[in-house]
Amino acid sequence: MAYKLNNVAVLVVDSNHNHMQLIKEVLRPLGVNRIAECTNAKDAITYLETNVVDIIFTEWHMDGEMDGLGFVEWVRKNPASKNVFVPIVMVTAQSEEWKVMKARDVGVTEFLVKPFSAKTMARRITVVIEYPRQFVRTDDFFGPDRRRHKISNYTGEERRKDMLEKGDQQMDEDAVQSLLNEL
């Protein structure tokens, strides 16, 4: 990774002080100097009401009334959120397939399973920089496109293509940038 990350603003949300320190210790050698930390979702929401960040790392399980999934939903769907398009990396030991799918379905961009290496975290950061995912809005979802790969031999209905041709709900990169400029 040959990026200069010294101007990247990162928010780390984790109730476990040791886990938060570990994430920060991995981020600093990668060049990340602007790291805000919150120990629960409520404090993170308060922070995000007045600050814009470039990447969020959040734990699934946190102390307080809201867990990481609720926090991600707030970031993606609440009108007070100024960070609806921010890449969110769920950092957790919860690696069961249904939990990964649940995190994806609330709007998580990437998933990082504990324990992780600095190389793995650097890979996640590289992915959000080099391969930003298009955002999708439906009746019950707003977040990064949940499909990672195009299947060349897919023969089913192309619902998203039809939506795009009709000018409905799907957001291309220009629409995303336009919305970002309005914030």
Image (cartoon, rainbow, N blue to C red):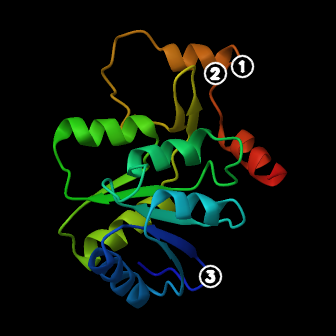
Task: Give the number of the mark in front: 2 or 3.
Answer: 3
Q: Which residue is mark 2?
A: 164
Mark number displayed over residue 167:
1
Question: What amino acid type should be assigned to the residue bearing mark 3?
Answer: Asn
Question: What amino acid type should be assigned to the residue bearing mark 1?
Answer: Gly
How far separated are the C-alphas under marks 2 and 3?
35 Å
Mark number displayed over residue 7:
3
> Residue 36's x, y, as percent?
54, 77
The answer to which image quadrant residue 98 occupies is top left
> Residue 106's x, y, as percent?
44, 38
Question: What amino acid type should be assigned to the residue bearing mark 2?
Answer: Leu
Q: Earlier in the sequence, mark 3 or mark 1?
A: 3
- CA neighbours of label 1 inside 10 A, class few (<14), some (14 to 19), many (20+): few
> Which quadrant is home to the N terminus?
bottom left
In percent of the image, x 27 and y 80: which residue is there?
Answer: 18
Q: Earlier in the sequence, mark 2 or mark 3?
A: 3
